[in-house]
Amino acid sequence: MEIEIVNAKTLKPYGKMSVAAETDISYLRQLIHNKFKQTPSADRQSLRLEPKGKAIKDTETLRNLKVQAGDKVYVKDLGPQIGWKTVFLAEYAGPLIVYLLFYTRPELVYGKNATEPISLTTHIAAICYTVHYVKRLLETIFVHRFSHSTMPLRNLFKNCSYYWGFTAYVSYHVNHPFFTSPCMLQVWAALALFAFCELGNFSVHIALRNLRPPGTKVRKIPVPDGNPLTNLFHLVSCPNYTYEIGAWISFSIMTSCLPALLFAFAGAFQMTVWALGKHRNYRKEFKDYPKQRRAIFPFIL
């Protein structure tokens, strides 16, 4: 069938092209750029059926979308793109460097006050922060399989500002020479909970990775994989976010640091938004999706 390709911003047509009804959107983006060289590259394209409509998922086909001969498909330029993995590596490497700078070179930040003895809690917090972001870096390289290869370049600056800025805010207080540690019972209990949540988060990431064979965009209902820490899938759609929030609340309790708690709440808010969106998509995509599951917080939300 023949469809018309139109610029979503200017509404000027690029031209017409013949495509099969079974063509999926991912492949259509490539076909559009191959035929009309003036269009953005495939990675920069967002296709939609209305100029200001929602972006169409890559897995949708023209037949499923009920696109017929003579219909228009609108192309929006998403702007300069950058690889997801590159963004993740930058946003996670930064906090590691920033935190360790405060921890290992306190004289650069606190001046002569840096001669005060460092508490055991400060040392433990530095280890926890390091473990968390080293884990994230290793997961980015060896575990995560991204459904999209790129994202808008502006996300690099936005994400790095968030992670790096909050890290500076938290590390300034936890590594401060006059930092006062809570009682050690509280520290050890929170450390145990932090370790549990980090292991749970890693276990869920492995389970999610194994759902998608290499080189594919297959989507399946996530389920526990035999690891007891993945049993949280029985209760929520995004247990990786649940564990992540738990880890940062634990860190906040361990250090009794208000900036760390603010970071935990900011992350919880954003992850809740993501989880609700993923939960809706799961329920829409899979008719047999477990009804008892919540998005992120068991029995609540």
Image (cartoon, helix red, strand yellow):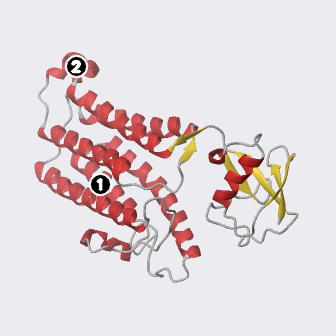
Position of residue 279 relative to residue 250, above or below, is: below
Position of residue 159 relative to residue 286, above or below, is: above
| Three-letter code, disc 2 | Glu
Q: Secondary structure at mark 1?
A: helix
Q: Residues within 10 Å of mark 1 (few under 14, many from 20)?
A: many
Q: Nearer the viewer, residue 228 or 145?
A: 145
Q: Quadrant of residue 115?
A: top left
| Residue 57 rendering spot, x and y as whole percentages | 63, 61
Q: Nearer the viewer, residue 92 or 207?
A: 207
Q: Quadrant of residue 281?
A: bottom right
Q: Nearer the viewer, residue 220 or 4?
A: 4
- Residue at coordinates 53% horizontally, 49% vertically from top-left? 149
95 lies left or right of 255: right
Q: Are marks 2 and 1 in contact (CB under 8 Å)?
A: no
Q: Secondary structure at mark 2?
A: helix
Number of residue marks: 2
The residue under label 2 is 107
Q: Residues within 10 Å of mark 2 (few under 14, many from 20)?
A: some
| Residue 73 rendering spot, x and y as whole percentages | 79, 57
The disc at residue 160 is: none
| Residue 13 rendering spot, x and y as whole percentages | 86, 48
The residue under label 1 is 247
| Three-letter code, disc 1 | Ala
Q: Quadrant of the N terminus?
A: bottom right
| Residue 141 rendering spot, x and y as whole percentages | 36, 47
Q: Which of pointers 2 and 1 lies earlier in the amino acid sequence? A: 2
Position of residue 76 relative to residue 4, above or below, is: above
- Residue at coordinates 24% horizontally, 45% vertically from top-left? 131
Whether residue 28 is visible to the viewer of this picture, yes or no, is yes
106 lies left or right of 61: left
Query: How far, Cα to Cα, is label 2 from label 1?
Result: 29 Å
